[in-house]
Amino acid sequence: MNGTVTIVTGGAQGIGRTIAAFLAEKGSDIAVFDIQDGADVCAEIRALGRECRFYSVDVTNTEITKEAVNQAARDFGKIDNLVNNAGITRDNLLLRMKEEDWDLVLNVNLKSVFNCTKAVIKHMLRTGGGIVNISSVVGVMGNAGQVNYSSSKAGMIGLTKSVAKEYAERNIRVNAVAPGFISTKMTDALEEKAREEVFKAIPLKRLGESRDVAYAVYFLLSKYGNYITGEVINVNGGLHM
């Protein structure tokens, strides 16, 4: 990925940070979009010899996102790739779910993908590019207590396939990665009994690591994935086949 420029949303922490750092290891300069401070991840990336800039962006806001993408294009001179990773959860059973929790999750997880993709596509029309959307296994198979999260991640898959069809002839490839249970602060907080139930459901009998997701993203954005578009790569240890 030498000489490329990649925007990673939600890139200041968690899986997004791992993706940003791994793509930098593989030669890409990185634009980190997040509402959290991205100084640490940019310092890590610069230590690898790559350029990194942090943009404080609320990706649910269409105009702010558009301006941030345009600014990144001016700063770096181009945009080659986009990783839509920003996301949150507000779990509850349907009958207990508040309307504001539905709206917030759909805005952060799905509207942000619309905002970022629409803004970036305009910069890719002449040069081509790659987009990877970080969906979820629950967007593929559903999950009780996560109707908002599952809906947003399923919507992301539909968006992925539609945009892939619209812009394939312009050499813009659009794919999704659907992680299963990945070792993060959220999964670390699971009670022992809940953790045991998770392990029972996963044929590989272990949680995934953030780098497992980063490897799939790299594959799709690199030359190794240059004949793949409109696909969903499941990184879930066999939880859903």
Image (tube, rainbow, N blue to C red):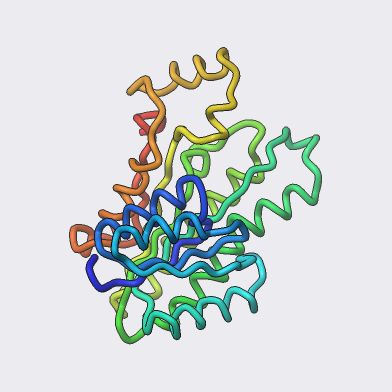
Residue 148: image location, x then y, percent? 66, 45
Vertical position of residue 81 compared to residue 190: above or below? below
Asked whether the viewer can see residue 117, the reply is yes
Residue 121: image location, x then y, percent? 43, 77
Lateral position of residue 104 relative to residue 194, left or right: right
Vertical position of residue 145 compared to residue 76: above or below? above
| Residue drawn at x 36%, y 54% as measured from the top left | 21
The count of marks equals 0
Asked whether the viewer can see residue 156, the reply is no
| Residue drawn at x 39%, y 80% as measured from the top left | 76
Instruction: Check the picture and name the quadrant holding the C terminus.
Output: top left
| Residue drawn at x 25%, y 54% as measured from the top left | 219
| Residue drawn at x 57%, y 18% as measured from the top left | 194
Residue sitting nearer the eye, 121 or 68: 68
Residue 169: image location, x then y, percent? 30, 78
Image quadrant where residue 30 sits: bottom left
Residue sitting nearer the eye, 3 or 170: 3
